[in-house]
Image (cartoon, coloured by chain):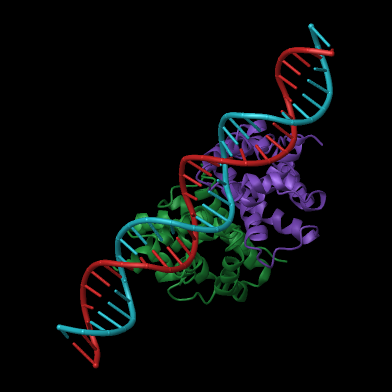
Chain colours: A green, B purple, C red, D cyan
DNA sequence: TCTTGATGTCAACACTTGTTGACACCCTAA
DNA sequence: TTAGGGTGTCAACAAGTGTTGACATCAAGA
């Protein structure tokens, strides 16, 4: 594997899981088995490396959903299957760990809105799109951040039922 | 105002809003108009200062709710009124900015579970308590972290309607 | 008045941070 | 073979981190 790709892999892993400011270039370089200086050479610096990890971050749909049923199905499937197919941190996790950051927060929020929330808005209208995002992120916070018990194991049928219940509830809101 | 209290005030403000690792002692000392060394003297160090800011962090109820109706009312009221009564970061914000932190994450999650989620569990059972937490934190993420449009202004009637809808949805779940 | 302990001031410490420049290596094109 | 650009290696830099020790100041009790 090329040096550039090794750096990108470990950078994404660490930046996404722990947040931009909480990860040092030496940690990434060490995990990749590579000299620190190469980061500045290949990506121009820390910010450049981080931005490179965002490439395609919000392209989570293979085929964009065209109606609400497809949207729900796609989301539940992605959430329920993600933990089994990959140990990598998810885009949702990345948003939770980085959207409060002083250095990259606005960048992240902007990317998210343009590349994802906009899709929700077009399909659901602004209010229901907001509540949709709220329950999806809330479910993730409860599961991964607060680690509340009561959230079913990610691979179980109950997990899908819980998530689907929240999503359908959010969509049942009428302004 | 005593030095100790000044430090505590600005420490809470900054730690809660930006996260433990993203705030330096010199930033806090400077905001408080006080020498850095006094932090180690008064609180033993950075961690001691942070822990001091957590005192009473989860005592958000004046009188603990004894049934679901009271729980919903209390929560909606606290959320809807908080932005008007204070510019200070909320306990929810603190959880979002610190529960992923490597140094204080487990401490925070533990405190939260013992002092708050436990109350929800006793009242609602583990599953509904988890979904309750999910929608409350999700609503906060959408509003303050992602800053999604579609969330109504905090002082409006619509804000209360949105939040109440999500909470009632979570509680309508039956395992 | 003298003493004592708490409180504040200042400088320095060892350490980590991101970044840069000098140098060596290696593969390819002339 | 010879040059040259991409790639990797190493050391150093200035800036920022939390913490500590020496010293001054001040208020209260003997």
Camera-nearest residue between A17 and A151:
A17
In x, y percent, where is residue A35?
A: 35, 60
How many marks the image carries: the answer is 0
Residue B27, placed above or below residue B55: below
Residue displayed at 50% across by 71% down:
A70
Q: Is residue A85 left or right of residue A74?
A: left
* Side (left or right) of A83 relative to B111: left
In the image, B93 versus B175, the foreground residue is B93
- Residue A133 sits in which quadrant? bottom right
Q: Position of residue B94 (x, y in %)?
A: 64, 47
Residue B173 visible within the image: no
- Indicate whether B106 appears above or below D20: below
In the image shown, does C7 or B162 lie closer to the viewer?
A: C7
Q: Which residue is more in the foreground, B30 or B175?
A: B30
* Residue at x 71% of width, y 35% of height: B66
Residue B86 on image: x %, y %: 79, 49
Q: Is residue B73 left or right of residue A18?
A: right
Q: Is residue A142 visible?
A: yes
Image coordinates of residue B99 in percent, x first then y, are: 56, 46
Q: Quadrant of the N terminus of chain B?
A: top right
The answer to which image quadrant residue B59 occupies is top right
Quadrant of the rendered image containing residue C22: bottom left
């Amino acid at each position: 594997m090329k040096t550039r790709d090794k750096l990108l892999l470990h950078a994404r892993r660490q930046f996404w899981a722990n947040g931009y400011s909480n990860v040092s270039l030496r940690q990434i370089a060490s995990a990749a088995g590579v000299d620190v200086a190469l980061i500045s050479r290949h990506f121009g610096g820390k910010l450049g490396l981080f931005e490179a990890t965002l490439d395609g971050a919000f392209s989570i749909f293979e085929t964009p959903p065209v109606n609400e049923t497809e949207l729900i199905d796609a989301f539940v499937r992605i959430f329920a299957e993600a933990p089994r197919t990959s140990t990598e941190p998810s885009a949702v996790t990345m948003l939770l760990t980085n959207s409060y950051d002083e250095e990259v927060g606005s960048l992240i929020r902007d990317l998210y809105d343009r590349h994802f929330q906009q899709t929700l808005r077009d399909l659901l209208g602004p209010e229901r799109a907001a509540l949709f995002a709220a329950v999806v992120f809330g479910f993730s916070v409860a599961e991964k951040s607060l680690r509340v018990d009561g959230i079913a194991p990610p691979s179980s049928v109950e997990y899908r039922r819980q998530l689907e219940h929240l999503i359908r509830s959010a969509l049942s809101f009428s302004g």
